Image: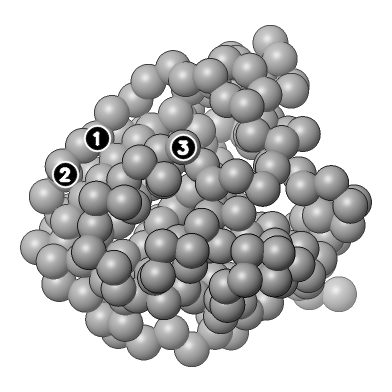
Amino acid sequence: MDEQKKLNDQWTSRWNERYRDEAFAYGEEPNSYLKDQLVKLPIGTILFPAEGEGRNAVFAATLGWNVSAFDISQEGKNKAMLLAGKNKVTIDYQVGSLEELKFKEGQFDAIALIYAHFPAKIKSEYHKQFDRFLKKKGTLIFESFSKKHIDYVNANEQVGGPKDIDSLFSIEEIKADFPNYTFLELVEQEIELHEGLYHNGTGSVIRFVGQKN
């Protein structure tokens, strides 16, 4: 078996297993930072990469956004469709890797990267692709674990997040991946997480809102 395919299959299996349970892994409520930032923006088209069980995409749809989302997990999509039905909204949710999907240049008014921890080898390339999908003057909303988080997850696995430092983020990496953005906010900070079964406790995150120049 091709080594990359083997890695992809292992990654997919991991997330399908997590999302197969009846309970929502990270809860049904949207991420608080995403919620706070999204309500400030004019409603339009938005993309949610690595959207899992759909809590953030469904929230955006309840506000009137035209929502696209994707993940590698079919089980994640199944849960997202249940949540969308419960909230009486529709979302366009695709299953597959980014290379397989047909998003277009300048398609979206906003992109939300909420704990979108892609494998270290591809995360910067994915960021560059997301940039191409975002319209000029479009908004990027981001919250993910920082490199300092490795100490927090080692102390308390309940807080969740990757255990390899290369999959975590630094402010320097964000500036390098998104050089053509005006950062309305870009911070590294300690926060308390209470999201479902797998994000509970004190962690360290990078948060930013950027506007594409």
Q: Which residue is mark 2?
A: 183
Q: Residue at x 46, y 37 (%)?
A: 32
Q: CA distance from mark 3 to mark 2?
A: 19 Å
Where residue 186 is drawn, which disc sits there?
1
Q: Nearer the viewer, residue 123 or 63?
A: 63
**Amino acid type of the residue that numbered disc 3 sits on in the rendered structure:** Ser
Element marked by disc 2 = strand
Is residue 36 left or right of 54 when viewed as pictured? left
Is residue 171 left or right of 70 when viewed as pictured? left
Q: Quadrant of the C terminus?
A: bottom left
Q: CA distance from mark 3 to mark 1?
A: 16 Å
Q: Which residue is mark 3?
A: 32
- Whichever of labels 3 and 2 marks the residue nearer the N terminus, that label is 3
Q: Give the percent coordinates (x, y) of residue 93.
A: 61, 76
Element marked by disc 3 = helix
- Crowdedness near tag 3: few (<14), some (14–19) or many (≥20) residues, C-alpha within 10 Å: some
Q: Nearer the viewer, residue 153 or 135?
A: 135
Q: CA distance from mark 2 to mark 1?
A: 6 Å
